[in-house]
Amino acid sequence: MKQKIFKSLGWVALLVGLLFCLVQSTVTAQAKTYQIGTDVTYPPFEFANKQNKYVGIDIDIMNAVAKEEGFKVNIKPVGFNAAVQSVQSGQLDGVIAGMTITPERKAKFDFGTPYYKTGVVMAVGKNSDIKSFKQLKGKRVALKTGTAAADYANSIKKKYGFKTVTFDDSNNMYEDVTTGNSVACFEDQPVMQYGIKQGLKLKIVSSPANTGWYGFAVKKGQNTELRKKFNQGLKKIQANGTYDKIVGKYLGNKTNPKVKGKTFTIGTDVTFPPFEFANKHNKYVGIDMDLIRAIANEQGFKVKIKPVGFNAAVQAVESGQLDGVISGMSITNERKAKFDFSQPYFMSGVVMAVGKNSKITKLSQLKGKRVAIKTGTSAADYANSIKKKYGFHTVTFDDSNNMYQDVTTGNSVACFEDHPVMKYAIKQGTKLKIVTKPAESAPYGFAVKKGHNQALLAAFNTGLKDLKASGTYDKIKAKYLGTDDNGSVAKTAADDAGSRSFFGLIKQNQGALLSGLSETMWLTVVSIFFATIFGVIVGLLGVVPSKFSNGVSSTLIYIFRGMPLLVLALFIYTGIPSLTGTKIPAFIAGVVTLTFNEGAYIAAFVKGGIEAVDPGQMEAARSLGLPFGKSMRRVILPQGIRIMIPSFINQFIITLKDTSILSIIGLLELTQTGKIIIARNLEGFKVWTIVAVMYLIIITLLTWLSNWVQRRTKV
Amino acid sequence: MSEKLRVTNLVKTFGTNNVLKGINLTVNENEVVVIIGPSGSGKSTLLRALNRLEEPTSGSIVIDNVDIASKGVDIDTVRENIGMVFQHFNLFSNLSVGENIMLAPVELKKETKEQASAQAKKLLKTVGLEEKFDATVQSLSGGQQQRVAIARALAMNPDIMLFDEPTSALDPEMVGDVLAVMKDLAKKGMTMIVVTHEMGFAKEVADRVVFVDDGQILEQGTPDQMFEHPKNERLQDFLNKILNV
Ligand SMILES: Nc1ncnc2c1ncn2[C@@H]1O[C@H](COP(=O)(O)OP(=O)(O)OP(=O)(O)O)[C@@H](O)[C@H]1O
Ligand SMILES: [Mg+2]
């Protein structure tokens, strides 16, 4: 029967084709009309809408291209196989029918520029437990004939031991799964996505496999003109946004035109596993990271992740330094006053954790005890809110590991933490146990500055919805938390004993440590360079015979020497942008901070060094008639510099050490690198030892250098 | 005998401390004037005011008919003409002996290195230190340093030389060499103003001795008048003290 249908369709196509050739020959003066075949129904690429008009991504693209290039098309929904055959036989000029470009097809067709990327996914019933191919063993799977998805399914059929049943159209295939006759079906991703969006009771449970491209095809060696025009037109509609609009219309704004192509800088915590943490390749992963990247990918924008720490990230968003923050951030009313939140993407709650062998199981046992919390978290808020009632006191930390360690070492008896975070940490080997049920259940949200970056926020919401629909969201969550409460977490490679030794740790983190060291060195060298210029100028202002200059010099020294480096760094990085509205890259902010701070010290000893030169030297020079500047240059400075050299070298070493403070603004220098490695493997003692030794080696080398320089200048 | 320098009503106060209380003094060309007086009387301040190392509070200092204390004067050019020798020598410790002498001529008179070093060597010879041209300052004795300092001041060919207790920081055996250089300079007709406690030098070389006490000139005259027939009671006291020590 199939053959019959096929044949009759072929004849219809032939007849229609001939008819059009006739019509066309009568209007040769007019723009040429091409005959394009397509599938009967292959939503969202081609299908009849309620008005029985053919629409879909393929149809719209073809029409848009024709319009752009000034030719006419007559699109005929003759069915995929018929269309393909008619093109081969020359009855139709081209085919656009969600046709995957394959080597076999290339032997018979010339393809235009690929216009859509696709891949095969597996979908199962909404309530099905099946999530992997392994679970298909002995089961029945529905396929649609002649599709790339069917080819893929057939290729893995043996390996996973499932049976297949084939259908001629997608709807029948879907139905076979929803009714339970088959347990799963394989389909092209966009098609499946569209179907689910339209209300199919299925869910996607695998990531796209066998990814390929859809292409517009003409018969090999024929219709070159049409193919060229298609390529040109496609390029134009991709450039002018029409393409995105078309795709968006059918697939729920995949690539959101408002954010497409833009890059957003997103702040996150340094370490808040399983939401964000650096894996052993030093790449940031975790639920938040995977989610924001997947949404960006889906919505067509780019993200730059800045793991600056939770507080810094929140402040940087407020000051406009960053566009958004995704950092396991609970949606609270206070925060809503300053931020606009997305739809909640995760539900969390606060639990109390205690040492493995602790007898504490209830809040009431905390009376008079010390409890560790992490600054600025909702767990901390919760702890503070019940602190009086249960009579415990708190100590705050800036990152989770320090907080856990305070409990494992026994300094504190308990800590409060978000449930998923605690769960993950314990699975990773933190010697704590959860003793309370999640309290204060709180939704996590992605946040932007209130009233700003609304397009990004909207894109996040749409993307989140799409990811939930496509099953990607559940997959991300499962990857880090397992699927049930006792579910296993993806085992991290850091667990094998070999990589826990000093040597193993060094080997494993060599790249990260060296790049941290090089960032430290860069910061030091660039900063000391500018600090020296700043310091010498300010120092000289302090000794010229002008009350005003002297005042400026003393004031600058007073301000920048008097301000803690940490405060200065935060002020410059988060404060200045709130005042001026322009962002400062962290590296620049770091250099500026050190320039001012170290520069003030340099200014002080430059001034001091000059003042330490016997005033009689200046008087003698001036009495000879030498002007102030010449006296300074030829007599005073040469003597002053000799006095200053030890201080200069000392300051160089201090600057090197001070760069570690800049880890607060998220600079990936040596200290920050250490923090991040520890966040992953919780080997605080060993990693800090390695980092400390690295600093010592560099400082020793510098000290040798300085001794050598001093010996040479003393002659 | 033409007039070289005239100080009129020179006043200098440091805050509320009135150090010079209206000094009037004239120095003629080729004249050697020795200033004596008790410690803290303002001798150094007076000398340093003459080339404006101390800025005068009021009064005028006329050198070659120009009031160098007035505002518009380029003091650096004026100073090229006034050599000064300090109690503690103040040689530039980052430079060698030769470089000390050559610095100002090279920087200010735009002399070539060769001209300047030839002149420096000549000057070193006149102070008896020709072999020290390349020596470091630190390797010289006090007396040698002071003679280099004199040579350095002479390198700019000044018309007037100011000496502020040039020998009082020296060991006694060195004093003679320095004084010999100064006597030599006086003989050649240099106009000199010398603050010193060396009464022998004053008696022998000075054309005039000026007694300063409490920021005022109380008496002046030839060495004979001043030392043999002092009129002012304070001068008599002062002479008694230093001659009887
Ligand atoms: N820069 C200054 N600031 C304040 N007071 C000063 C300054 N220089 C000098 N004086 C004061 O002026 C007075 C005169 O000092 P000056 O050095 O001229 O005395 P002097 O006669 O040279 O004494 P000596 O014989 O000890 O060298 C002293 O009381 C001294 O304290
Ligand atoms: Mg004196």
Image (cartoon, coloured by chain):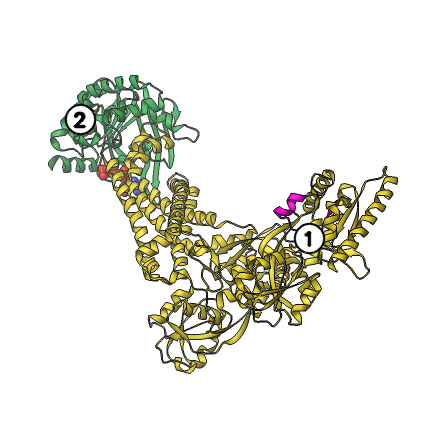
Chain colours: A yellow, B green
Mark 2: which secondary structure? Answer: helix
Q: Which of the four quarters of the rendered structure image does ligand 1 lie in?
A: top left
Residue A563 in magenta?
Answer: no
In the figure, A172 relative to B186: above or below? below
Q: Is residue A383 left or right of residue A259?
A: left
The image quadrant of residue A364 is bottom left
Q: Is residue A57 left or right of residue A655?
A: right
Q: Mark 1 Cα within 10 Å, few/some/many (few <14, many 20+)? A: many
The quarter in which the C terminus of chain A is drawn is top left
Q: Position of residue A646 (x, y in %)?
A: 28, 43
Q: Mark 2 Cα within 10 Å, few/some/many (few <14, many 20+)? A: many
Which stretch did the figure color magenta? A94-114
User: What residue is shown with label 2?
Assistant: B178
Q: Amino acid at mark 1?
A: Gly
Image disc number at residue A98: 1
Q: Residue at x 86, y 43 (%)?
A: A22
CA distance for labels 2 and 1? 109 Å
Q: Amino acid at mark 2?
A: Val
Q: Residue at x 13, y 33 (%)?
A: B171
Foreground residue, A234 or A318?
Answer: A234
Q: Is residue A342 visible?
A: no
